[in-house]
Amino acid sequence: MLKVHDLAVHFKQKSSFALWQKSSPLRAVDGVSLEIHENETLGLVGESGCGKSTLARAIARLLTPTRGTIHFEGKDISTCPEHALGEVRAQIQMVFQDPSSSLNPRMTIEQIIAEPMVIARWNKKKIAARTAELLDLVGLNHTHLQRYPHEFSGGQKQRIVITRALALHPKLVVCDEPVSALDVSVQAQIINLLKDIQERLGVSYLFVAHDLGVVRQISQRVMVMYLGEIVESALKSDLYALPLHPYSQALLSAIPRPKPGLVRQRIILRGELPSASNPPSGCRFHQRCPSARAECAEQKPLLREVAEGHHVACHFVQ
Ligand code: SF4
């Protein structure tokens, strides 16, 4: 359904020294390829600043890519001008991290849910019928419609955001850290809701999170991103059973074990994420990698298939 090839999003930066000096662009996303199939959830993980939210926004065409293509249902949407993006925006919806800032505090819940349908010029009867259908789907009460966002908890607000995202029957919902701002118990409710919606409607998700434990609960496939690039991609079962890239191994080692007594050795990475405007040469992870060798600083590893459906960007993974 969605095919992204060699996607890059670079941001121009002003030089901090002199006006006439050019500084190198911030390479937030740098050559990412991925596919999302119908009725599938692709998890995208990586630490803050790795470019995953920028990638998500570029796929939803809230940002214009610097390079590469995005094919959605066979049509290249990467070069679509702003005025022609209406149909794309209906088909690819976004759910953001903070539900409070996604909802206009001056609008009632009914107005918020109806807004995309009003913009799409649906008539009142059709909007009312779709609103009732959506409320049942997400477990919101019809009495909630005349209330305002501040009257709801964080979990309920995220339900409202999800309801609005589903209004125009999208095929893909891009969820950018949708549960990171919520309590753990509420996180589970929202993830179960998203899974339930997928079962009933067949919608696909790109699920972005920094927490591998959260991504595990909902994804069928998982991609690990580091400094603008994908370093590992595999079926969830393969990645969690045997992560092959040293960065994925470090991320996974940070997930608490559910069974007491089972100890996993924590891998602590050295230093911070390097700057995306001046990424390290060779393997971008070499300054922090516990397995790095001399050649890692010179030669860039390619993302290659090491087992069926399992791709890794590391020179030493066979
Ligand atoms: Fe580590 Fe070298 Fe592999 Fe990069 S290529 S992940 S630095 S071992």
Image (cartoon, rainbow, N blue to C red):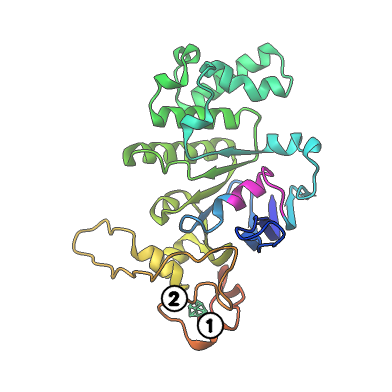
Q: Marks 1 and 2: CB-CB under 8 Å? A: yes
| Residue name at image x 69 percent, y 36 percent | 89
Q: Which residue is mark 1?
A: 296
Residue 275 visible in the snapshot: yes
In the image, residue 55 sits, relative to residue 137, either above or below, namely below
Q: Residue at left 57%, top 22%?
A: 113
Q: Is residue 276 magenta?
A: no
Whether disc 2's CB lies below 8 Å from ligand 1 is answered: yes
Of all residues, the one furthest to the left in this rendering is 261
Residue farthest toward the bottom in the current orientation of the protein: 294
In the rendered image, residue 8, in percent from the top left (x then y), is placed at 68, 59
Q: Which stretch is magenta? A: 54-65
Can residue 41 be seen by looking at this rendering?
A: no
Find out whether residue 61 is within the magenta segment: yes
Q: Is residue 241 left or right of residue 58?
A: left
Q: Position of residue 313 (x, y in %)?
A: 56, 74
Q: Earlier in the sequence, mark 1 or mark 2?
A: 2
Residue visible at 34% across and 65% down in the picture: 253
- The location of residue 55, given as percent across then percent down, is 61, 53
Query: Does mark 1's beta carbon lie closer than 8 Å to ligand 1?
Result: yes
Where in the figure is residue 36, as x and y percent of width and height? 63, 53
Q: What number is the disc on residue 289? A: 2
Closer to the camera in the image, 33 or 203: 33
